[in-house]
Image (spheres, rainbow, N blue to C red):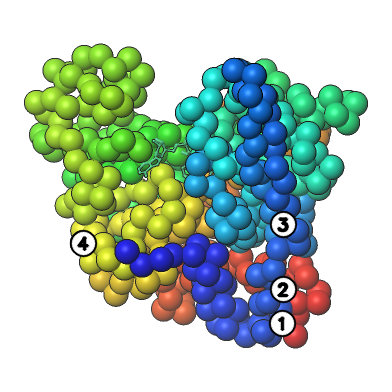
Amino acid sequence: MEHINPFTNAMKNLHRAGAALGLSAEAVEKIGMPDSIIQRELTITMDNGETKVFPGYRVQFNNARGPYKGGIRFHPEANLDEVKTLAFLMAIKCAVVDIPMGGGKGGIQVNPKALSEGELERLSREWVKTFYRDIGPDKDIPAPDVYTNPLIMSWMADEYSKLVGEDTPAAFTGKPLEVGGSAGRDTATAQGGFYVFQELAKHKKMVPAETTVAVQGFGNAGYHIARLFHEAGYKVIAVSDSKGAIYDKRNGGMDPENIMNTKKQKGMIDGCYCVGTVCDCENYKLISNEDLLKLNVDVLVPAALENQIRSENALEVKAQVVLELANGAITPEADAELYKRDIIVLPDSLANAGGVTVSYFEWLQNKNGESWTEEKVFTELREIMARSFQAMWELSQEKHIHLRDAAYLLGVQRIADAMPTAKE
Ligand code: NAD
């Protein structure tokens, strides 16, 4: 398998955009340079009394347009290259949807599934004790990412408030509603992706009942997008999690809510017996995550981790549309291959920007002491996603470039405009 450094991939995209926009090499270099890379050891006491050390990260990328903003990932393979890449993508993403935020990302290299709840809480609070001077509601506002969730954000916001001596809900987003979270934040990433998809579906005149969908990943992004497709009448025929995938042999479309219940209960569903976290039964066939990517579906949604569609499997992707909910799910080589084959990629920088957009709404509500209804959140979100899609679509048509490049052009141009020294 090709070795993929995700940061190198992100820089390839940036350089292409910089050249197309006529930016100077110096300006491009500046945009591709993090403002700070912070790596510190986090030490906690485990339940058995032993102490354990975990590498912790925060990378901040370009605050010319506003405070740094981006999630914290808990994953055994989290590393600096990954966090750096994701922080850069956040800067681009915020600019693509035109919200006044820069890029940030954090992480801990840990397998959270191997920790007790008490250990997870101590580790989450330790991240804040270690990084709280580097973040803050006007400086850098973290949020959830892979294997972090509203509960973890509530511990983190609480720890931050204790350390600075005042209640500061705006220091973290993605919190539970009761402690200053926003209505709609839990489903915002998927909801935003779905709005983007719906704009494309209008152009392509796609009919829900005749359109099949496969979703890789069944967490915050993956579960909710599968649910939204199902609720809108699309046929979801495959979903997966880290342990494997299930494919609906009937081609009739599975109900993601039932699958989620089964996943939680590991019991019987629709004549299925569930083994581990996926179901093996008459109607469903167990397949691998790799097989899911190659299914003969109309829409493929990678919603798990990066580098899933690579040069060695891009030729086998059969979908007409790839909705890239996971960050960096497609390598540049694979992207070029998909473009050559007229497969439309709705790129991560727009497709999953609903999460940060509603995080921005949450931050605004906390700052202004407001509490928006879910209807207001989704109305504003839809408008932003539809407007951003339209801008990206028109630019791609006008310049005959693929959608990722069009999104990058919009984002990079906006960042360059906010950095007077980046202009030629
Ligand atoms: P999550 O932790 O809620 O879910 C991750 C899912 O991926 C789980 O179902 C897990 O089982 C699955 N998974 C893990 N490893 C896998 C593998 N090797 N193959 C297949 N599935 C695997 O995470 P999430 O928040 O849904 O994030 C998923 C992606 O979406 C990430 O790329 C993340 O950066 C991106 N994203 C999330 C948000 C958000 O608000 N949650 C916002 C923007 C982007």
- Estimate the x, y position of residue 162 in percent, counting from the top left: 84, 24
Between 103 and 356, the one nearer to me in the picture:
103
Mark 3 → mark 4, Cα distance in angstroms: 37 Å
Q: Amino acid at mark 2?
A: Lys
Kindly give the residue lying farthest to the front in the view shown: 50
SS of the residue under disc 4:
loop
Mark 3 → mark 1, Cα distance in angstroms: 20 Å
Q: Is residue 382 visible?
A: no
- Res. 286 image quadrant: top left
Residue beneath the point at 42% across and 69% down: 332
- Res. 216 image quadrant: top left
Residue that badge 3 annotates: 37
Between 68 and 211, the one nearer to me in the picture:
68
For marks 3 and 1 on the same chain, the one whose residue lies earlier in the sequence: 1
Q: Is residue 395 left or right of residue 183?
A: left
Q: Is residue 107 visible?
A: yes
Mark 1 → mark 4, Cα distance in angstroms: 39 Å
Q: Quadrant of the N terminus?
A: bottom left
For marks 2 and 3 on the same chain, the one whose residue lies earlier in the sequence: 2
Residue that badge 2 annotates: 30
For marks 1 and 4 on the same chain, the one whose residue lies earlier in the sequence: 1
- Res. 27 image quadrant: bottom right
Q: Amino acid at mark 3?
A: Ile
Q: Amino acid at mark 1?
A: Glu
SS of the residue under disc 2:
helix
Q: Nearer the viewer, mark 3 or mark 1?
A: 3
Eyeballing the image, is 205 above or below 53? below
Residue beneath the point at 81% across and 46% down: 134
- Estimate the x, y position of residue 33 in percent, counting from the top left: 69, 68
Residue that badge 1 annotates: 26
Residue that badge 4 annotates: 316
Q: Nearer the viewer, mark 2 or mark 3?
A: 3
